[in-house]
Image: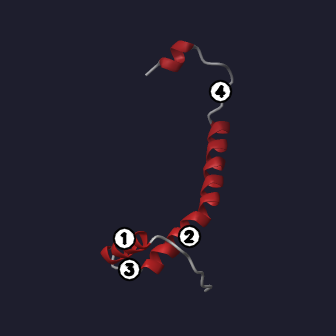
Amino acid sequence: MKNITLSADERLIEQARQEARAQNTTLNHLFREWLGEIARRKDRIQQMDEVIARLDRELAFDRKLTREELNER
């Protein structure tokens, strides 16, 4: 595992430490989780785009629906 050095406002660091204590974990652990979430964002966006594209293909209509059909319940 690689180490990094960060700078932040002292109050912000203390608030983050308090949150870590409240979650019964460490600031380091919370930070690693946060980094992981950032790193996975691109993958999640790509997965959502694939689902939307698949739904778009599966829900395609052969013709344009009328206003009445669109508003049917």
Which residue position is annotated with label 2? 36
User: Could you say which is closer to the camera, residue 71 or residue 31?
Assistant: 31
Regarding mark 1 in the picture, which secondary structure is present there?
helix
Q: Is residue 63 above or below residue 16?
A: above
Regarding mark 2 in the picture, which secondary structure is present there?
helix
Which residue position is annotated with label 1? 15
Between marks 1 and 4, how big is the CA–CA gap? 53 Å
User: Could you say which is closer to the camera, residue 25 or residue 73?
Assistant: 25
Number of the front mark, 1 or 3: 1
Question: Residue type at mark 3?
Answer: Thr
Task: Please tell me in which quadrant of the rendered image residue 35 appears.
Answer: bottom right
Q: Nearer the N terminus, badge 1 or badge 4?
A: 1
Please state the horizontal and vertical placement of residue 33, each as a whole percent of the image.
Answer: 50, 72
Q: Nearer the N terminus, badge 4 or badge 2?
A: 2
User: Could you say which is closer to the camera, residue 72 or residue 39?
Assistant: 39
Q: Nearer the N terminus, badge 2 or badge 3?
A: 3
Q: Residue at x 58, y 80 (%)?
A: 5
Please state the horizontal and vertical placement of residue 57, each as a whole percent of the image.
Answer: 68, 38
Instruction: Tell whether 54 sits left or right of 14.
Output: right
Which residue position is annotated with label 4? 61
Q: Is residue 29 above or below residue 42?
A: below
Between marks 2 and 1, how big is the CA–CA gap? 21 Å
Which dot marks residue 25? Answer: 3
Number of the front mark, 1 or 4: 1
Number of the front mark, 4 or 2: 2
Mark 2 crowd level (few <14, some 14–19, many ≥20, 10 Å Cα): few
